[in-house]
């Protein structure tokens, strides 16, 4: 709800922001606050600005207090990681002066920038992907897309559909390793989104360690993780696949060619672990399926014919 976002701002800003966003709330993606600069609003297909008032140090402190509920010490770990998840599952990225110790980020101080990413649950958005992911059995699946192409929204709905107790034919036990608290958007351990009744969540847990924990202790049928990319992630995915657990994940890649250029994931590509690569669009095609590929990089096209799904194979690099 919009009130979850408005409360972050001083009262003198709230009316202006509400008037500017108005009926476009469903299309709002981000609000970017920069000290002494106009506030930027990014919608699905446009950008606009709040010319005044300009946020200064007082507004920055106000927003920080709202984010931390007046206890910055309690949010120390989140602040060190550069983001805080708030009620409703919205994630606020933070930037400013970086304080390091032993080549690691110790704190962000002073804070001068906020990126408020609006969380949206779109139930049913993954319907078009499910025939590729499940055709009598689940496939290891990687959702590809550029930043802000809808990957997290899509994988959240995939999780909901798989872990729904009413979907008896496909219902499975799912574990989400939610390193950045974006998929389930848990607040004090409670998911803010509908992720299905058969889902367990390891919140704010590093992906590689979380996948191993899940395999050892939660016996998932399916593991879901967001934005893989490190060699540790790759090793954990290999371990999961060898343990008989299916993995559904996302990866930043604007094309299938971008995927094959990612050096850190070459091992899982060489071992053909993933059976489906589903590419999402950008811009006006956010959240739309652009292409689907098999483990060999060949395009897959599913066509409905006589109530059955026909698979049409084409070369990926025509």
Image: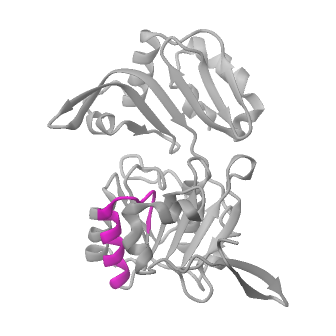
* Magenta-colored span: 224-242
- Image coordinates of residue 109 in percent, x first then y, are 30, 22
x then y, percent, for residue 261: 48, 61
Colour mapping used in the image:
one colour
Q: Nearer the viewer, residue 293 or 236?
A: 293
Q: Quadrant of the N terminus?
A: top right
- In the figure, is residue 279 to the left or right of 26? left
Quadrant in the rendering for residue 290? bottom right
Figure quadrant of residue 302: bottom right
| Residue 246 appears in view | no
In this picture, is 38 found above or below 7?
above
Vertical side of 111 occupied by 85: above or below: below
User: Which residue of the protein is positioned furthest toward the front in this rendering?
Assistant: 318
Q: Main secondary structure of the magenta part?
A: helix
Return the residue nearer the eye: 7 or 255: 255
Q: Residue at x 40, y 28 (%)?
A: 95
Q: Is residue 8 visible?
A: yes
Looking at the image, residue 223 lies above or below residue 96: below
Total of numbered circles in the picture? 0
Q: For the view shown, which residue lies furthest in the left direction?
A: 102
In the rendered image, residue 269, in percent from the top left (x then y), is placed at 44, 74
Percent x, y of residue 77: 27, 39
Relative to residue 289, is residue 196 drawn left or right? Answer: left
Residue shown at the point (54%, 82%) measured from the top left: 138
Residue 256 lies in the magenta-colored region: no
Residue closest to the eye, 73 or 263: 263
Image-based side of 1 in relation to 101, left or right: right
Which residue is depicted at the point 69% across and 64% down?
289
Does residue 100 appear left or right of residue 37 in this picture?
Answer: left
- Let me know if residue 235 is in the magenta part: yes
């Amino acid at each position: 709800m919009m009130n979850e976002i408005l409360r972050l701002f001083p009262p003198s800003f709230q009316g202006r922001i509400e008037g500017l966003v108005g009926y476009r709330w469903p299309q709002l993606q981000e609000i970017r606050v920069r000290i002494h600069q106009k506030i930027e609003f990014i919608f699905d297909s446009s950008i606009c600005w709040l010319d005044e008032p300009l946020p200064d140090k007082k507004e920055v402190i106000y927003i920080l207090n709202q984010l931390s509920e007046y206890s910055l010490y309690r949010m120390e770990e989140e602040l060190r990681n550069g983001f805080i998840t708030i009620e409703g599952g919205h994630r606020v990225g933070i930037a400013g002066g970086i304080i390091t110790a032993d080549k690691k980020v110790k704190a962000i101080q002073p804070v001068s920038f906020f990126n408020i990413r609006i969380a949206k649950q779109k139930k049913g958005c993954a319907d078009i992907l499910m025939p590729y992911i499940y055709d009598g059995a689940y496939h290891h699946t990687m959702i590809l897309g550029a930043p802000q192409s809808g990957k997290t929204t899509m994988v959240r709905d995939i999780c909901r559909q798989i872990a729904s107790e009413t979907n008896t034919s496909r219902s499975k036990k799912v574990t989400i390793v939610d390193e950045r608290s974006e998929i389930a958007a848990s607040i004090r351990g409670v998911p803010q989104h509908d992720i299905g009744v058969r889902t367990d969540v390891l919140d704010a847990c590093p992906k590689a360690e979380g996948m191993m924990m899940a395999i050892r202790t939660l016996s998932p049928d399916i593991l879901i993780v967001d934005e893989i990319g490190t060699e540790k992630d790759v090793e954990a995915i290999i371990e999961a696949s060898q343990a008989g657990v299916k993995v559904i994940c996302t990866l930043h890649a604007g094309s299938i060619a971008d995927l094959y250029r990612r050096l850190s994931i070459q091992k899982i590509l060489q071992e053909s672990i993933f059976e489906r690569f589903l590419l999402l669009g950008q811009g006006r095609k956010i959240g739309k399926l652009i292409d689907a590929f098999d483990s060999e990089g060949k395009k897959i096209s599913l066509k409905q014919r006589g109530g059955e799904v026909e698979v049409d194979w084409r070369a990926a690099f025509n």
